Image (cartoon, rainbow, N blue to C red):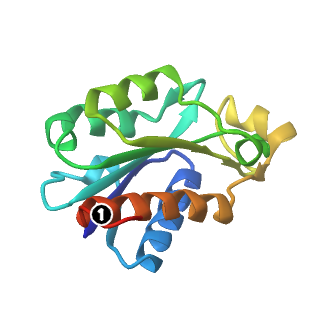
Amino acid sequence: MTILVAYGSKRGGTGGLAHMVGDALRDEGFSVEVAPARTVKSVRDYEAVIVGGALYAARWHKDARRFVRHHVHDLRRRPVYLFSSGPLDYSATQTEIPPVNGVKKAMGDIGARGHVTFGGRLASDAKGFPASAMAKKNAGDWRDAGHVRTWVNGIAQSLRTQASPGVAA
């Protein structure tokens, strides 16, 4: 099975998470392409799609939103999972964080099978407002590879079950 992991990332943290997702999927035996959402022209060559976006002021990254809108019809025809990144603390590893309203709407529009929020990352030397102000108090990296692998393991089991009807998971 070939899977696309497309992402919208402003400062690279969500891109890093997308690559963690891709690596975990490869470890599960899938063929995976990881790409910035803005560069993907078509999803037709993929049997499943994962879309990730950074959260800024409770909004999903514009490239992830545009990707879903542009490919809505094709995404409805295949298994799709979404992820968000953003909390600048360990809350994402301690409790399930529901999708923000825009992501919840996107999930409904495409029939996404699931969503997870991962911890974010903010460099201490972040440029621009409000990032530089936030970095003074909240710089750090809360992305958790174990959290990513656990989520991907669930997706892998679901995709294998779907690919082999009648086989118990």
Residue 160 against residue 59 in the figure, above or below: below
Q: Residue furthest right?
A: 137
Residue that mark 1 sits on: 3
Q: Amino acid at mark 1?
A: Ile
Q: How many marks?
A: 1
In the drawing, does residue 3 fall left or right of residue 133?
left
Depth order, front residue of 16/25: 25
How far across and down, in percent of the image, does residue 101 sit? 49, 20
**Residue 28 visible in the picture:** yes
Q: SS for tag 1?
A: strand
- Residue 138: name its quadrant: top right
The residue lying toward the viewer, choosing from 20 and 63, is 20
Quadrant location of the N terminus in the rendered image: bottom left
- Residue sitting at 43 percent across and 70 percent down? 25
Residue 131 as seen in the image, left or right of residue 157: right
Residue 68, quarter of picture: top left
Visible in this render: residue 53?
A: no
- The x and y percentages for residue 41 are 17, 51
Q: Is residue 33 above or below residue 82?
A: below
| Left or right, 152 with reference to 96 | left
Residue that appears at 33% across and 70% down: 32
Expressed as whole percent of the image width and height from the top left, the position of residue 114 reads 44, 42
Question: As displayed, is residue 61 above or below residue 151?
Answer: above
The crowding category of the residue bearing disc 1, from other C-alpha atoms within 10 Å (few below 14, some 14 to 19, many at least 20), is many
- 116 horizontally vs 128: left or right: left
Q: Quarter-wise, where is residue 137 in the image?
A: top right
Coordinates of residue 2 in the picture (x, y in percent): 25, 68
What residue appears at the point 77 percent right and 44 percent down from the top-left corner? 94
Q: Quadrant of the C terminus?
A: bottom left
Q: Nearer the viewer, residue 25 or 39?
A: 25
